[in-house]
Amino acid sequence: MDIYELIKNDHRRLLDVLDSIEATPEANAEQRKRLFSYFRTELMVHAKPEEEIFYGELRRSDLGRHLVQEAMDEHHTLERLVMDIQTSSAKDDDWIGKLRTLRQVLETHMQKEESEYFTLGKQLFQAQDAEDIADRMLAEKGRYGMENPVAVVGKKIKEVLG
Ligand SMILES: [Fe+2]
Ligand SMILES: [Fe+2]
């Protein structure tokens, strides 16, 4: 697996969790909350290793440094939105609206990563490098105790819901 596949898998996994939250009825606020805490962990275990490893490698070029600055700003915006949702009651009328805003910002950010950032990566890294970088990012994710395969999401969601 190369770094592009790994990041794409993570992105899909994050959207899967958001799907499950949106599919949870408003009356079940407790469940929405639990799923959101799980989402928050998944996001952190994606974003931190991504910053360390993938962005760290992109930073080696001038264009990369510029893109990474932008990406870091977006990560901070996402963190703020996550904190806001985490600290508000899932019973609030605007809770799901906030979640949808977060999703929009996240999707835009991920699309940019999968286009511009991957394009730059493919200019900077050889095929073997792209696999080595994925291995390093996986190892970093492992430090947080996270498995990788997307298939695991359904299982995890069930666990979260008990
Ligand atoms: Fe990112
Ligand atoms: Fe990402």
Image (cartoon, rainbow, N blue to C red):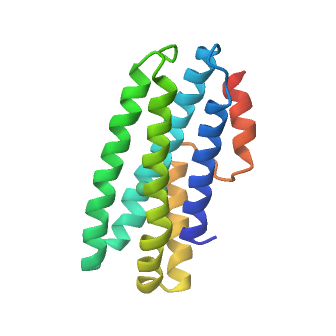
Return the residue nearer the eye: 13 or 129.
13
Q: Residue at 25% of width from left, 69% of height from top?
A: 66
Return the residue nearer the eye: 140 or 13.
13
Q: Residue at 66% of width from left, 27% of height from top?
A: 160
Q: Quadrant of residue 123?
A: bottom left
- x, y percent for residue 128: 55, 82
Task: Count up the numbered dots.
Answer: 0
Q: Could you tell me which quadrant the N terminus lies in?
A: bottom right
Q: Residue at 37% of width from left, 57% of height from top?
A: 51
Return the residue nearer the eye: 106 or 131.
106
- x, y percent for residue 5: 61, 67
Q: Is residue 94 above or below residue 110?
A: above
Residue 78 is left or right of residue 151, and the answer is left
Q: Could you tell me which quadrant the C terminus lies in?
A: top right
Q: Is residue 147 above or below residue 123?
A: above
Residue 102 is left or right of residue 67, and the answer is right
- x, y percent for residue 157: 69, 33
Q: Quadrant of residue 138?
A: bottom right
Q: Is residue 54 above or below residue 60?
A: above
Q: Quadrant of residue 29?
A: top right
- x, y percent for residue 85: 42, 27
Q: Residue at 48% of width from left, 17% of height from top?
A: 93
Residue 150 is left or right of residue 59, and the answer is right
